[in-house]
Amino acid sequence: MTHPESSLVTPVSAAPPPQLLRALGWWEATAIVIGIMIGTGIFIVPAEITRSMGTRDAALSVWAVTGFLSLFGALSFAELAAMMPQAGGQYVFLREAYGPLTGFLCGWSFFVAAQTAGISVLAVGFAEYANEFLPLTPWEQKAAAAASIAVLTAINYRGVREGGALQSILTGAKVGAIAVLILLGFVLVRGLPGGPDSLAAPTGPRFVSSFGVAMVGAFWAFEGWNACTFAAGEVKRPERNVPLALILGTVAVIFIYMALNLVYYHVLPLDQVARSSRVGADAAARIFGHTGAYLVSLLIIISTLGSLNGSILAAPRVYYAMARDGLFFNWCARVHPRFHTPHVALLVQGAWAIVLVAAGTYEQLFTYVIFAAFVFYALTALAVIVLRRKLPDVPRPYRVFGYPYVPMIFVLGSTCFLVNTLVEEPVEAGCGAVMLGIGVLVYWFWKRKAAPGATPAPGSHP
């Protein structure tokens, strides 16, 4: 006689869903910071800053002030990243400090313009410099830009280890080549160039406003130090390695930028720096002769690819976190069962960036978003203070040096920058504000669309 128990089937537990892997070490995380920050800006922007300020020392002071403000921001972000080492980074920090709307607006600006348009700008820059070695028609340049996005997206699709390894190689090659350029610039070129010591320099109140406008270009060159936090959910020992990457990476870039500017002023007359559209290539031509421009073009190609790969790697983690919160397309929360990457978020980002390349609207979007980006930079630094009060008992493996002065200096500096942008560039600032306003409407759409049981990002605080 069969006992009833014999008919019972032991339930088999469902396999756990695939998760992101912690596969990035401290160097890979640092390579993301350095690799994204050093793009094309440092080879172009010094001319605009020199024109705005009129003297070498004033231009260098713009780089120094902007660099230290960026470092203060990185120090502030480091505390939050060590406290909440989750995929999404800055989005998560803002969500926990101010609520889901603020976090969504940050992620919205990233997807619409800050990250995707930045990727498009880098891809087009790569194609333009590749054109010097392989002549391309305008449409072929767009195709090359789109292809660079597609190839790097495919590499990062296959795994964060692969993306991190490529980032390490590109960043190492970039920093090594820049170090050679700096060293040989001082060794091979003797004596200061002739020409005027100053140009038409602003004075009085105009100096302050010109300083603020010049900082726009410098901030663009420093842009990207925050992206390492997006991938914090895939960094080994994140409580140690993410703050280390933020601080080491930002400090290294400050020194590199100051040294490169000193080389430019050492080998070129001030007026030539001011009127040059490609000051890096002009400086290299003075150092190495006719082939110097080609060497810098090759350096910029490597630099651009490093910045492009880092951006493609990091940003989809924000959309992944948003989707897990029910604030983005649900399928962007999927993790590939074999490669353990947010593969759908990567594909969506790549597709939108390629659309922007084809449409040619990336430059306008990227300009508009600078204003919005600094709103969220300031709010994130302020979140250090807000969360110390709101969540005092949450472990903080790293506490920002000079608290509360360091985050407050960054907040005040960002606020002054925002006010100056409103006054000096009201159209760009207004477009950035409109973009955020549209984001509020989109947020309410997602809130109504989201299922009641949307899964919050793992590890989020109540």
Image (tube, rainbow, N blue to C red):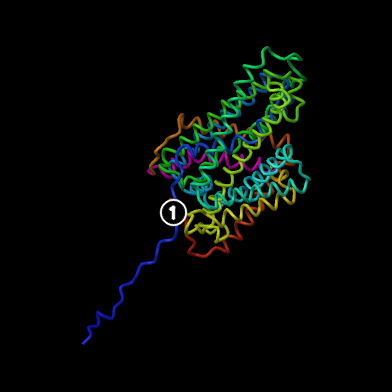
Magenta stretch contains residue 457: no
Q: In this view, does 373 lie to the left or right of 389?
A: right
* Residue 82, horizontal then vertical, whole percent: 43, 41
Q: Could you tell me which secondary element the residue under label 1 belongs to?
A: loop
Mark 1 is surrounded, within 10 Å at the Cα level, by few (under 14), some (14 to 19) or many (20 or more) other residues, namely: few
Most prominent secondary structure in the magenta stretch? helix
Query: Measured along the vertical axis of the image, is residue 298 above or below residue 95?
Result: above
Q: Which residue is drawn at 65% across and 43% down?
A: 118
Q: Which residue is drawn at 68% across and 51% down?
A: 354
- In the rendered structure, which segment of residues is drawn in magenta? 367-393
Please state, as top left, top right, bottom left or bottom right, where the N terminus lies in the image: bottom left
Q: Name the residue under label 1.
A: 458
Tell which of 148 and 452 is nearer to you: 148
Out of 400 and 56, give the one closest to the viewer.
Answer: 56
**In the orientation shown, which residue stands out farthest toward the top?**
191
How many badges with numbers are in the image?
Answer: 1
Residue 56 is drawn in which quadrant? top right
Left or right of 32? Residue 288 is: right
Q: Where is residue 32 in the image (x, y as percent from the top left)?
A: 54, 39
